[in-house]
Image: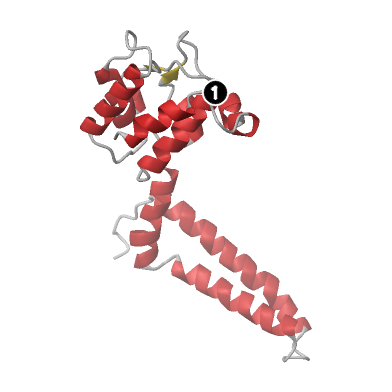
Amino acid sequence: MFNEPVGWDKYVERPRLVFYGIGLLLMHGSYTSLLKYSDNPKSFFFYANVFIFFGGILLSQITWSKRFKNVFIPKIKEKLKKQDNFNISITKNQLQKLYNGFVQYDMIHSEQTNLDDFIEVFLKDWHTHNSKIFFKLDAPSCREFYELFKLKFPTNSLSLIDFFKRSDTIRRKDGKPYKYSTIKDAKSRTPVSNRSEDLKAIFESL
């Protein structure tokens, strides 16, 4: 048995050691307090430190369970996975209707953004294409579009900063990126955009 190879999976062992270390610290830190308040075992501080001590034991032991590796570690990996897609639950037909609405109300630069570009931005990983969406919208209108979109299609991982900054797929009509801070603060300065009614009409038609 001592000749069996031992593998080191950093994505499993590092979180395990962190949680194990926290458990040991909780046990060590509460043990001295347990001794301090042992003369009065009915006091709040004694019970609190008992709870912390056994919590440390539980935390240090659970890291060696199969559940920690098979359930908890995959969740950690999922949380830490780099975001490179909006993960929107939307059909190409719905995106086509949305695109046509933008063209109808002159909210998008259709010569620089065709339908395929529009669909790729919303559905594909950001680094797999060079498509951009060139909006003819000011910051308050962009903010209102984002909020209406999130409301209409709630199943997504779309965030304001991902959409207008990190994805690098959204442009103004002059080709320059939008300033994220301007869009983020737009609602406080202009609660209702100048394209509000048009935007609502587009989303109501979907």
Q: Against 26, is 174 above or below?
A: above
Percent across and percent down for residue 104 are 32, 18
The colour scheme used to paint the residues is: secondary structure
Percent across and percent down for residue 38 are 74, 88
Q: Nearer the viewer, residue 13 or 69?
A: 69
Q: Nearer the viewer, residue 101 or 183?
A: 101
Furthest residue to the left? 93
- Residue 160 visible? The answer is yes
Total numbered badges shown on the rendered structure: 1
Q: Against 48, is 130 above or below?
A: above
Percent across and percent down for residue 46 are 71, 84
Few, some or many C-alpha atoms within 10 Å of disc 1 (few <14, some 14-19, many ≥20)? Answer: many
As shown in the figure, which amino acid type bears the numbered disc 1?
Ala
Residue 126, by quadrant, is top left
Residue at point 40%, 63% (across, down): 68
Residue at point 74%, 78% (across, down): 33
Percent across and percent down for residue 86 are 37, 35
- Residue 166 visible? The answer is no
Residue 205, by quadrant, is top left
Residue 63, by quadrant, is bottom left
Q: Against 86, is 101 above or below?
A: above
- Residue designated by label 1: 139
Classify residue 9 as left or right of residue 120: right
Classify residue 68 as left or right of residue 19: left
Classify residue 44 as left or right of residue 139: right
Q: Quadrant of the C terminus?
A: top left
Residue at point 77%, 85% (across, down): 37
Q: Quadrant of the N terminus?
A: bottom left
- Regarding mark 1 in the picture, which secondary structure is present there? helix
Q: Nearer the viewer, residue 85 or 62?
A: 85
Residue at point 29%, 59% (across, down): 3
